[in-house]
Amino acid sequence: DTAVSQTPKYLVTQMGNDKSIKCEQNLGHDTMYWYKQDSKKFLKIMFSYNNKELIINETVPNRFSPKSPDKAHLNLHINSLELGDSAVYFCASSPSPSQPQHFGDGTRLSIL
Amino acid sequence: DAKTTQPTSMDCAEGRAANLPCNHSTISGNEYVYWYRQIHSQGPQYIIHGLKNNETNEMASLIITEDRKSSTLILPHATLRDTAVYYCIVLTGNQFYFGTGTSLTVIP
């Protein structure tokens, strides 16, 4: 049973398109996160939700919009995709904001 | 920004202990030290965390110096599957700032 699952695993699309990445966790955690890992393997937090409320919103372009329909889901919608958005996006969850996080296997986004 | 400094890479012979150092000289009194690892193409995996005391679990041991300015992650008997990038992180304001980590290669 996958604890944190992301779909799709791979996403190849054209510049200017809009796309969404979905994340679901079955651990009963209250907090969920989105991270971006660029080509240099630097992992950086983008957003965090606790009980469906946004608690962390790092300096991320407005084209990125997270949505949390319930505590088990945190989706990431990206408008007007740019070449620089190519990266691996990781979803994670934790029981609370200060506790160990469980990560998904990532979504590899490639912009053509 | 990451508050930790780690060596870029290390090698370890299979079956030997792997000792991964981390400096966090600006750590505050109530900030925890966390260790994660990332095996190629996978999501980061939690290993262990601690505040002041040494900690041990089924994966590793964490040794934190008395002044808390540095710590060492110990994998007691490294296997080839332990080859990964290991991140030492200071939890700051409920945020994990991942640095560049240490790339550990376990050699047969």
Image (spheres, helix red, strand yellow):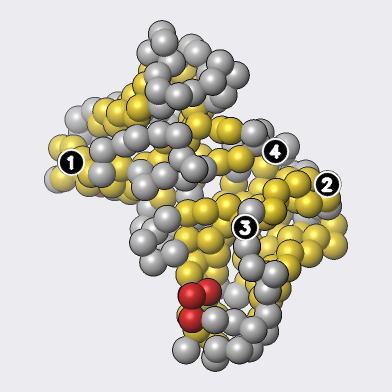
Q: Position of residue B36 (x, y in %)?
A: 45, 40
Residue under label 2:
A51
Q: Depth check: A53 or A3 in front?
A: A53
Q: Position of residue B86 (x, y in %)?
A: 37, 42
Among numbered discs 3 and 2, the one appearing first in the sequence: 2
Residue under the image location 47 percent in, 18 percent down: B55
Q: Amino acid at mark 1?
A: Asp
Residue under label 4:
A97
Q: Amino acid at mark 3?
A: Thr
C-alpha distance separating marks 3 and 2? 22 Å
Q: Position of residue B4 (x, y in %)?
A: 40, 34
Asked if the residue at tag 4 contacts the one at tag 1, i.e. Cβ–Cβ closer than 8 Å, the answer is no
C-alpha distance separating marks 1 and 4? 34 Å
Above or below, comparing residue B98 to residue B23 in the picture = below
Discs 4 and 3 share one subunit:
yes
Asked if the residue at tag 2 contacts the one at tag 4, i.e. Cβ–Cβ closer than 8 Å, the answer is no
Q: Position of residue B72 (x, y in %)?
A: 34, 24
Residue under label 3:
A59
